[in-house]
Image (cartoon, rainbow, N blue to C red):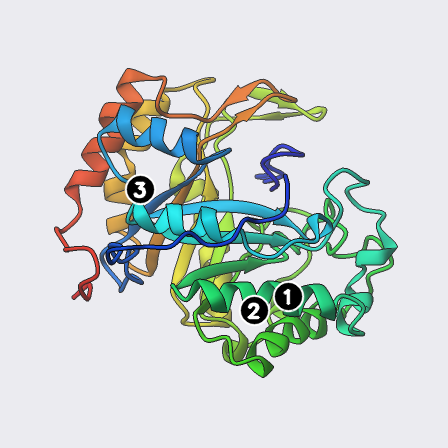
Amino acid sequence: MTASSRAPESAAAPAPAPAAPSVATPLPPPAPAPTVGVPLLGISAPDLAAFDRFAAATGTQPDVYDVFEAWGNDRPLDLELAEAVAVRGARLSITWEPWDASGSHTRQPAYSLRSIAAGDHDGYIDRFARSVQEHGRPVSLRLMHEMNGKWYPWGSGVNGNRPGDFVPAYRHVHDRFTALGVTNVEWVWAPNAVYTGSAPLAPLYPGDAYVDAVGVSNYNWGNEIRDGYRTSWASFGELFDPSLAELRSLTTRPVWISETGSSDSGGSKAEWVAALSAELAARPEIVGLIWFDHVDEARTVDWRIEDDADAVAAWRTVFDARPRVPRGQPLD
């Protein structure tokens, strides 16, 4: 999903970057890559001010901060932002989207999968790769997420994309980074949760040589009528277990819940959040979770936690219940 331009599509379902600031003293290291059994907890938020509000309200410092970056912005990594995230002790995650976010969600021939694989965007890709390399710190890159759905120009069966087009496009981008010697990237392949009518995942998987972690998106919309159909309250397992099983049939790579959230329609958001401790403990393959801390204005759903006192308390309990691991130390 793209925070600035559309609501989450889970079924069952600004200016050029400034130069990096000089740093007089060493910055704290970002949250380390997790190992099985110690999940990192992060958020996607509109900006760093929102990140700071979340941290202040919950009394927790998220391990990961995810941002959405459209290729249509045609700019390198914002190094000032990246350093600001590092100062907060968080790992930067980038949801990297080949499209013009102000245009059609599905009809953008300039960003077809074949155009990417053919090298039409190599100048931009290389510029972005070099900026990531300049940053130097570990960065998670979630490239062309939710590709098994039909709501993005890189999606299955839209924008002229044919079966078999996704993997060459994904590998081409990865190979550009490799050719430039960029080694500080964790490549995250992250489909939408499987649903009736979604594209099968196996033909879309680039292979373990191109993927460091896999992810999945899904949301508890609660009891709503959304886009003409009715949704109902769903537990964590109902949302994710079918997709986790399909992912496990493809790879043993670590798993991220790369986007999730709960509404309050038909149940308690706070209780849904509180249950995360047990849900994550029961699924040790999950190494991290990103809460989508935004307001879906189009569909009037507020996924945020910080304005709900009970949800805040629940998040703090889940956060504090994890094993204590010093930042920058191995997660043994």
Crowd band around label 1 with a 10 angstrom C-alpha radius: few (<14), some (14–19), many (20+): some
Q: Mark 3 highlights which residue?
A: 62
| Nearer to us in this view, 141 or 164 | 141
Q: Secondary structure at mark 3?
A: loop
- Kindly indicate the quadrant of the structure image that contains residue 205: bottom right
Residue 91 % position (x, y): 36, 53
**Side (left or right) of 10 relative to 184:** right
Q: Dot 2: few (<14), some (14–19), or many (≥20) neighbours within 10 Å?
A: some
Q: Are marks 1 and 2 in contact (CB under 8 Å)?
A: yes
Answer with left or right where residue 99 lies relative to residue 296.
right
What amino acid type should be assigned to the residue bearing mark 3? Answer: Pro
| Horizontal arrangement in the rendering, residue 282 relative to residue 70 (left or right) | left
Instruction: Give the distance between the C-alpha atoms of the residues marked 1 and 2, in whole angstroms.
Output: 5 Å
Given residues 52 and 111, the one toward you in this image is 52
User: Are the two marked residues, 3 and 1, in contact with CB atoms closer than 8 angstroms?
Assistant: no
Residue 243, image x and y in percent?
50, 54
Q: Amino acid type of disc 2?
A: Arg
Q: Which residue is mark 1?
A: 127
Secondary structure under tag 2 reads helix
**Which residue: 46% across, 53% down?**
93
